[in-house]
Image (cartoon, helix red, strand yellow):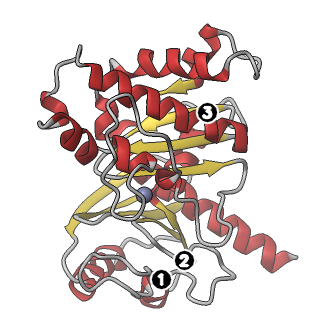
Amino acid sequence: MILGGIEAGGTKFVCVVGTGKGEILKRKVIPTTNPEETLNAVITFYRDQFIEGLGIASFGPVAVNPDHPRYGSILATPKAGWANTPILQILKDALGCPVAIDTDVNVAALAEAEKGKAWDVKTCLYLTIGTGVGGGYYDGELLHGRLHPEMGHILLPTGKDDFKGICPFHGNCLEGLISGPAIEARAGKKAQLLEEDSPIWDEVAETIAQGLVNFQMVLSPERIILGGGVMHQKHLFPRIHKAFYRLINGYLPFTEEEVECHIVSPGLGDDTGSVGALMLALKGLKQGQSAFEG
Ligand SMILES: [Zn+2]
């Protein structure tokens, strides 16, 4: 089965053609300019690829719940020109195949559950920590609710240094405290340039662990995958493991060794979004089929 998968980001659209098994056969990168120009280039790329279904892993906010009156549209994004773009409908009309859409982080959770580090469990939380912070959750279905989760904006206490956080909406939410720009504001230099032994990393790890404990208590994931630019700092993992174990404080049955296998880096690397978009296309096709048969 030949499928299409799009990782629709704020700077580029990574478009792939691949199989239902997640193998990528062809790839094209299209810059994100205005919707008309970008989507026309996407349509031109897919027009002669004979895809049977398309999955879109989109930047948000995006209406991903089929019951939403503007299902498949980008909502109030600061990205110039893109607010209220009915991306799903435009591509469906132009390509004449079923199209499924979800958030980039939900799709990453799906990818890791199907083909990555959560292949052996039924529930998985994916959190990306980079310029922004966002999370997705998969338990056989992708979590939507009223819009979709915004896990980066849970409120957390400030650390020992009393850094107030930089989120324009909340100050000290998870994103406001530990995103790349937040670390830069806290340290006075880029996160990549901050020494490994800086106490700021301990604060960052502590806050991430607090967030993860909250997600653990609410969603009970069997694996937590941490991706994004900030998590390229591999020394954060042991710090997060330690803090997570300490904060759980024996309330949940975790040994220290289990925590190390519970909170891990992504298994698919840079292909997470593309593989996930193919998996989403497949899922959309199957659901469409069962609705048709039902
Ligand atoms: Zn916030």
Q: How crowded is mark 3: few (under 14 residues within 10 Å), some or many (20 or more)?
A: some
Q: Decide which of 270, 214 is in the foreground and name it.
A: 214
Q: Say whether residue 55 is left or right of residue 31.
A: right
Residue at image x 64%, y 74%? 65
Under mark 3, the amino acid is Val
Name the N-terminal-most of marks 1 and 3: 1
Under mark 2, the amino acid is Ala
Q: In which quarter of the image is the N terminus?
A: bottom right
Q: Where is residue 86 in the image (x, y as percent from the top left)?
A: 44, 87
Residue at image x 30%, y 53%? 166
Name the N-terminal-most of marks 3 and 2: 2
Q: Say whether residue 93 is left or right of residue 181.
A: right
Q: Where is residue 67 in the image (x, y as percent from the top left)?
A: 69, 82
Please tell me whether mark 3 or mark 2 is closer to you in this view: 3
How far, Cα to Cα, is label 1 from label 2? 6 Å
Under mark 1, the amino acid is Ser
Vertical side of 168 occupied by 243: above or below: above
Q: Is mark 3 on a helix, strand or loop?
A: helix
Name the N-terminal-most of marks 1 and 2: 2
Label 1: which residue? 73
Q: Quadrant of the C terminus?
A: bottom right
Label 3: which residue? 213
Q: Position of residue 291 (x, y in %)?
A: 79, 76
